[in-house]
Image: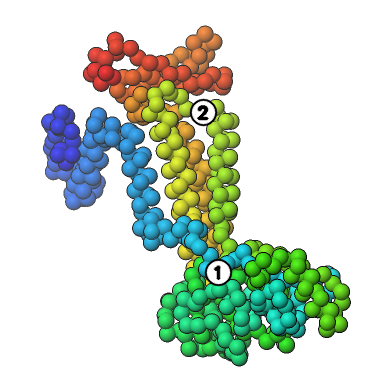
Amino acid sequence: MSRIVPRDCRDEWFARWSGNFAAWQILCDRGELRRSKSHGFADFCKNSFRDAWAARMRNGATEAVLYGPRIVACTGASLLILIAVCSGGLHGARSLFAVIPVDDPAALVAIDYPSRPTEWAATLARLIPLWRAKSTLVRDVAGYRYQYNGSLAWVSWNFFSLLGVRPAAGRLFQSGDRDAALISYPAWRSLYGRNPRIVGTKISAEGRNYRVVGVLPEGFWALSPVVDVWAPLDLGTAPPGPRILVGAVARLRRGAGAERAGRELSEIARTVNLPARSVHIFALANRLPGREADLYLIGTLFAGISCLVMVVREHRWPIGQCWRYWPFLSLKVVLAVCIPLLAWIEFDSLVRILRPALGAGATVARILAAVTFLVTCARALWWSFADQRRRCPVCLQRLTMPVSVGSPASIFEPVFTELVCPNGHGALALPDDEGGRRDRWIALDSSWDELFGNRSS
């Protein structure tokens, strides 16, 4: 155990614990110890190890490492590397900036032509093939139906080809498909282990059997992120179920505006004796694969504002004039935000992939992850300022050796706690009362060099 102790105090430590060991042996021989000899020896070794390690930690070189600025940077970098390794190279963060797996999304629009003014996102099914055949401004039109918060959606055979989606495995729907099905990438990964042999097998969805013909690409979802199975839609019939939404999507031809296309589709609807009602056409951005960067940005801003409120209320602003002081604070703030944020993003990405297997637990897990991020990020930012407050502005070492100054009962000598820099650069005076006084940095001159072993120079 003495090999753990620093060399300058090793002999003294060894002599002290050798005497303790001799005394322990005498007590054992006399039978004055309650515990057995083996258990007592184990306790003696454990206590000596703790004392040796404490002596090592009290060493000046060790304290310089543990309380210096490098340990913060190294720990933060290690956590970032650990997150990157566990997440496959920050897969979730990279997916936020991935290209949407849809061709020319600017040309995609949604069409609303409800049979009643009170309906929302609804279109008469028999109009879709009519518009597809007669419109000169719309290149293609496809229909869809899906149940709110349901895992199964019905789309016309040309729905995915209209979007320009390329399957990750198998093929897309073709004209004439009836009991075929496409599955989402999360369902393929979490439920079927990315087995390529899933294509051609039969699955059951909402009481009906389907034959899998393909797998949609990673990062793609449409209509609703909880849809895992897609089945062909016969525009002449509607599948049973409550709260069924019926809609249409289209791809405009180059140079065709939404307003002109709406008027043309409305005129086509009148040719089959439908009411003179406007056709609403708007961009499909809110129904295309969504990115959740805004959610993470809002969460980060909320955590930052929460931390700022705590810092302002406590009046614990950092001090220091050295140029290294402020970049170090900035580094800690960046690490305090990036580490919890990346952990949140990667965990959220994993939950989305495993959502088909987790079911309702996925929603609970995402809520808990968001709350954990807010608390962790706010506390980490708060720690950044609190830690900076107790560091020397010259060498950035943690201030140690607390000294109490003044008296709580004195008006002229208010009570302070002075934290002294271990390198002798100065002391930080922290008020212990509620008088509203700010922190005060006291620089030590050269007359203190002898006390600190000339380390302040």
- Spot occupied by residue 443 in the image (x, y as percentages of width and height): 38, 16
Quadrant of the snapshot with the C terminus: top left
On the image, numbered disc 2 is attached to which residue?
A: 316
Height in image: 66 above or below 346?
A: above
Query: Which residue sits at x=24%, y=39%?
Result: 53
- Spot occupied by residue 116 in the image (x, y as percentages of width and height): 84, 74
On the image, numbered disc 1 is attached to which residue?
A: 102
- Drawn side of residue 426 relative to residue 233, left or right: left
Of label 2 and label 1, which has the lower sequence position?
1
Please state which amino acid type lies under the numbered disc 2: Arg
Mark 1: secondary structure: loop
- Drawn side of residue 6 relative to residue 233, left or right: left
Query: Which residue sits at x=33%, y=12%?
Result: 445
Q: Determine the image quadrant of residue 31.
A: top left
Q: Nearer the viewer, mark 2 or mark 1?
A: 1
Please state which amino acid type lies under the numbered disc 1: Val
Rounded to the nearest angstrom, the CA distance separating label 2 from label 1 is: 50 Å
Work out whether residue 80 can be spotted. Answer: yes
